[in-house]
Amino acid sequence: MSKLGLLHYFLGLKVEQTDNEIFLHQAKYVNDILELFCMTQERPVSIPLAVNHGISLDSEGEPVDPTYYRAIIGSLMYLTALKPDIMFATCLCARYQVNPNTVHLTTAKRILRYLLFS
């Protein structure tokens, strides 16, 4: 093996190394998924999940593309490693990946809007 120098990026994480510490940043990954799901121009929100969210299996709404919904949830699940503040909301949305509807998609997109705020 040859010495390639310090590690700068690994699996979408920015890595900063000093003599005593290693810092991991997901800012680039957050920006990439916001651009992927066309959420960069949306209005930010200060909390990832509304207080009376009303999301359940029986939520009323039109069915949405499950593949698109799963892509959002998968991206958010990767973020929960370094952003535990979105853990509850993301896991709540992950329960409805089989038959998502507009209520579930709106809740998932709210989490993305929260990432704009944080």
Image (tube, grey):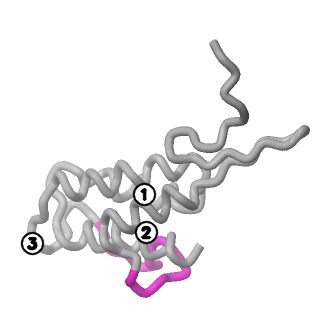
Image position of 84 (left or right of 40)? right
The three-letter amino acid code for the residue at tag 1 is Thr
Image position of 66 (left or right of 44)? left
Q: Which numbered disc, 3 or 2, marks the residue closer to the eye?
A: 2
Mark 3 = which residue? 62
Nearest the viewer among 24 and 109 is 24
Q: Which mark is residue 1?
A: none
Mark 1 = which residue? 90
Q: Residue 18: x percent and y percent?
A: 85, 43
Q: Are marks 1 and 2 in contact (CB under 8 Å)?
A: yes
For the point 55% across and 81% down, which residue is it?
46
Q: Are marks 3 and 2 in contact (CB under 8 Å)?
A: no
For the residues labelled 3 and 2, the Cα–Cα distance comes to: 20 Å
Q: Residue furthest right?
A: 20
For the point 67% across and 37% down, which residue is it?
7
The three-letter amino acid code for the residue at tag 3 is Glu
Nearest the viewer among 86 and 14 is 14
Q: Residue 99: x percent and y percent?
A: 14, 55
For the point 13% across and 64% down, which residue is it?
64
Of callouts 1 and 2, the N-terminal one: 1
For the residues labelled 1 and 2, the Cα–Cα distance comes to: 8 Å
Of callouts 3 and 1, the N-terminal one: 3
Which range is magenta?
41-55
Q: Quadrant of the N terminus?
A: top right
Of callouts 3 and 2, the N-terminal one: 3
For the point 33% across and 52% down, which residue is it?
94
Q: Secondary structure at mark 1?
A: helix
Image position of 22 (left or right of 71)? right
